[in-house]
Amino acid sequence: MADTDDRRAFFATAAKGTEGALRDELRELRLPAVKAERGGVRFGGTLRDAYRACLGSRIAVRVLQEVARFRCTDGDTLYEGVREAYRWDEVLDVRRTLAVTCALKNSQLTHSAFVAQRTKDAIVDQLRDTFGARPDVDKSDPDVAVFVHLVKDEATVYLDVSGDSLHRRGWRAKGRDAPLKETLAASILRLAGWDRVRPLADPMCGSGTLAIEGAQWARRIAPGLARECFGAERWASHDATQANVIDALREDFRACILPASESPDVLATDLDARAVAQTKENARLAGVPEIQVMQQDIAELGPAEPAGHVVVNPPYGIRLAAGDALIERMAYAFRTLPGHRISAICADDALVRGLKPLKPSQEHALWNGDLECRLFSWDIA
């Protein structure tokens, strides 16, 4: 069985444009050899370090362990590379299931289904030689998830340590249309420069994602504590020693949680009564019922004491139904908040134009799914 103290290479994936925020977060989690790259952040360390990332990262989407890297130009070199580069019986036996996914770019192999099939064949053939039988495939809920990244004819093979996507915190009772993913909301708060000291307000809260992420972050409630099981806990190598390691990490994170009385005020408002009800329920399920939630138009937003930080994800792009009238109400509200910082994620510059002559003090590009956005911040004098 593999030891949790073995040194390994890991890659934490992130939404495009949030890699720098994830890098800073993983450094705060004291993970070694952290380096941001396109699509995520590499780090070294042990399986214990990967568990710490799964438990503590608000921004990572998945945590992957690199198990093989080799030159790959056709199906045969892919098969041999996967079969020979790793002992698959370390994580798989005939009682466990697997699934293979892949991403291809600028390579001679161009069909993802073929790459996934040949990778699966290499794994199960090796295991058949070892056990005399092969594991089954389960694409919806595998015990072991394998990911192949093939770029410029170089294949990197990963095991998914995290399992299900880390944006699923386990508290969302009922999302509204196009909810902001929790991992992206956490990135926005960090990139916007919220210090977890000033009051935080989201005047268009939807299902409450920004406010809930902010309240949990301020109280040091690790997002992974709500997860019953991570991917690596279903591997064949997961034994009592490894179970004790992750149990101890969970206790360490629980011990860091601050009481609500030591966190800043967090306000979530929305004009829609359904959004208000959903935010209240989500906040309760997330363990932060202290969030102040109320039904209110954004034009009624008043200043906080002390001056706070407003972070908002307004309707934009194809979802923007209220048009210029909404922009005018937002601009009116924001101009009446001296000393506050305003941060908004926008798909265009309509709000920037609406707030003229005020100029953004900060602009950052990031992606909400396939939609390119800008995170603008204004410091109101």
Image (cartoon, helix red, strand yellow):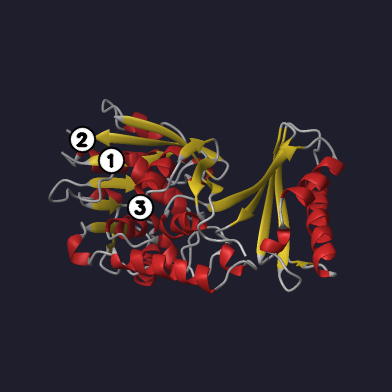
Look at mark 1 in the image and give the residue it sits on: 342
Please provide percent x and percent y for residue 226: 44, 69
One can see residue 287 in this view: yes
Q: State whether residue 90 is above or below residue 42.
A: below
- Residue at image point 46% right, 43% down: 316
Q: Give the mark nearer the N terminus: 3 vs 1.
A: 3
Please provide percent x and percent y for residue 128: 84, 65
- Say few, some or many: other residues with alpha carbon within 10 Å of mark 3 (under 14 / 14 to 19 / 20 or more): many
Which amino acid type is marked by label 1? Ile
Along the line of sight, the residue nearer the viewer: 305 or 133: 133
- Locate residue 74 relative to residue 1 in the image: left or right: right
- Residue at image point 31% right, 52% down: 202
In which quarter of the view is residue 108 placed? top right
Disc 3 versus disc 1: distance between alpha carbons? 13 Å
In which quarter of the view is residue 358 placed? top left
Q: Are the residues flagged by discs 2 and 1 in contact, CB closer than 8 Å?
A: yes
- Residue at image point 37% right, 49% down: 30
Along the line of sight, the residue nearer the viewer: 250 or 38: 250
